Image (tube, rainbow, N blue to C red):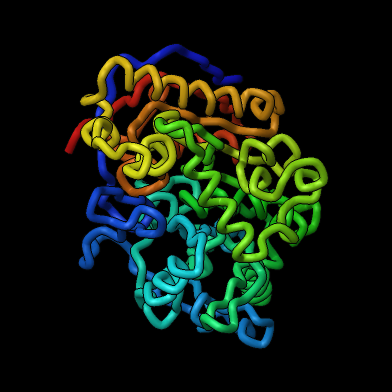
């Protein structure tokens, strides 16, 4: 059974800022938009599992360290029952640092130093241990890999003068070695995913992840809010491309990018998913909003490209956009849909693109609840489950944002 929908322009949209956990970037004028990620309330709800921090064993000896030289870390909650040999690995998101100053600032945050990381993190949404909230993966081994390099786990260089270590690739490999030694080598099912810049990581490292396991292991990847497109901003510039150029150059990313891309495109272009997904051989699911709130605020209509503030209301709430602004937003949406058309042809790929003004959608409210985004009465969790377990093909592009309302 194939679920496939391509539909027209959205007439009206609502905005929603997710505040239930660590999966969502909350962007506003007071927050540095290049790296800040919201963790929600410091006091998690009583029914949300809190999981302790584990340092990556043997990482320092491999030079796999955070920006400030500290050992990287992850949070692991063990699976049980039918999920004891199933593994779900999440890359934490949190944007990037693209110059010495931004990386120096970042190393004094949880996104650059394990000494500043929370000792416990809430596991909700796709990481939840409750079957009623996470029916497909609740009893799997579930891992949150903390993000402390600023290049989507892909750099490998250093700045000795400024005492900065750009070792994302080594962190990724070292963490996988550690988890393999703790039972992941026996996995019969595995899913690699991430949110935001972590969603980009899941694309960049998807085939590498597949290579860790024997061919008998079911391995797939999911990118949530990680399909960043090479868009022209409202001033005619390319804000996100400029950021990526800095990241790739500063952090020595080029050598770790897929050769099938760098053999014919510049390294910055190979940091954009649209130039990668067609050649990834491991089954991949793209979960994204066609009106991605982070990209609208930081790439399409960033404050730097809007000195008069004409987009101030629109970039925070699409219901406030003028007709001309909606036309620009529709062009952004069309660019995203065009970028996934070839990718969608394969029967092993999955797509769920809605029109919510949101960024990541695997959190507690968005994943599987009474007001989760849905298409044809199927939630995101159900769609991803159908795809992962080969129950149905899922190719959904929807013009609406069902069930979501301003809260």
Q: Position of residue 56 (x, y in %)?
A: 56, 79
**Placement of the C terminus among the 4 image quadrants:** top left
Residue placed most toward the observer, 88 or 61: 61
At x 40% / y 59%, what residue is drawn?
Answer: 35
Residue 361 in the image: state x and y as whole percent: 40, 42
Q: Is residue 110 left or right of residue 55?
A: left
| Residue 264 to residue 92: above or below | above
Image side of residue 403 versus residue 166, left or right: left
Q: Residue furthest left?
A: 407
Does residue 77 appear in this view?
Answer: no
Percent across and percent down for residue 80 are 51, 64
Check the picture and name the quadrant holding the N terminus. top right
Front one among 65 and 354: 65
Residue shown at the point (63%, 48%) measured from the top left: 271
Q: How many marks?
A: 0
- Residue at the extreme top: 8
**Residue 215: percent from left, percent from top:** 80, 52
- Can residue 279 be seen here? yes
Q: Residue at x 44, y 73 (%)?
A: 104
Q: Is residue 391 toward the left or the right of residue 373 in the image?
A: right
């Amino acid at each position: 059974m194939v679920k496939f929908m391509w539909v027209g322009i959205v007439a009206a949209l609502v905005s929603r800022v997710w505040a239930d956990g660590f999966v969502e970037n909350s962007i506003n004028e007071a927050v540095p938009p290049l790296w800040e990620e919201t963790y929600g309330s410091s006091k998690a709800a009583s029914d949300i599992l809190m999981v302790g921090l584990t340092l990556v064993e043997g990482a320092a000896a491999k030079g796999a360290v955070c920006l400030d030289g500290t050992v990287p870390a992850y949070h692991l909650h063990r699976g049980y029952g039918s999920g004891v040999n199933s593994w779900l690995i999440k890359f934490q998101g949190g944007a990037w640092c693209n110059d010495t100053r931004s990386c120096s600032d970042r190393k004094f945050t949880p996104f650059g130093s394990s000494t500043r990381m929370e000792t416990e993190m809430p596991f909700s949404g796709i990481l939840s241990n409750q079957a009623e909230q996470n029916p497909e993966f609740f009893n799997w081994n579930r891992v949150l890999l903390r993000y402390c390099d600023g290049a989507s786990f892909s750099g490998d260089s250093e700045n000795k003068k400024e005492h900065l270590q750009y070792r994302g690739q080594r962190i990724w490999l070292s963490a996988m070695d550690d988890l393999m030694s703790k039972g992941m080598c026996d996995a019969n099912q595995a899913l690699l995913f991430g949110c935001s810049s972590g969603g980009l990581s899941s694309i960049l490292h998807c085939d590498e992840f597949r290579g860790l396991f024997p061919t008998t292991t079911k391995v797939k990847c999911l990118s949530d809010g990680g399909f960043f497109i090479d868009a022209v901003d409202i001033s005619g510039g390319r804000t996100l491309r400029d950021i990526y150029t800095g990241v790739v150059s500063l952090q020595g990313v080029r050598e770790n990018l897929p050769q099938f891309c760098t053999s014919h495109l510049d390294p910055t272009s190979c940091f954009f998913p649209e130039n990668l997904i067609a050649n990834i051989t491991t089954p991949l699911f793209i979960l994204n909003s066609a009106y991605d709130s982070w990209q609208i605020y930081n790439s399409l209509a960033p404050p730097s490209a809007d000195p008069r503030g004409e987009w101030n209301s629109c970039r925070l709430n699409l219901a406030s956009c003028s007709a001309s602004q909606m036309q620009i937003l529709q062009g952004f949406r069309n660019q995203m849909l065009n970028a996934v058309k070839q990718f969608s042809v394969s029967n092993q790929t999955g797509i769920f693109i809605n029109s919510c003004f949101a960024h990541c959608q695997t959190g507690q409210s968005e994943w599987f609840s009474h007001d989760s985004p849905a298409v044809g009465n199927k939630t995101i969790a159900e769609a991803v489950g159908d795809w992962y377990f080969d129950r149905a093909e899922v190719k959904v592009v929807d013009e609406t944002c069902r069930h979501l309302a301003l809260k």
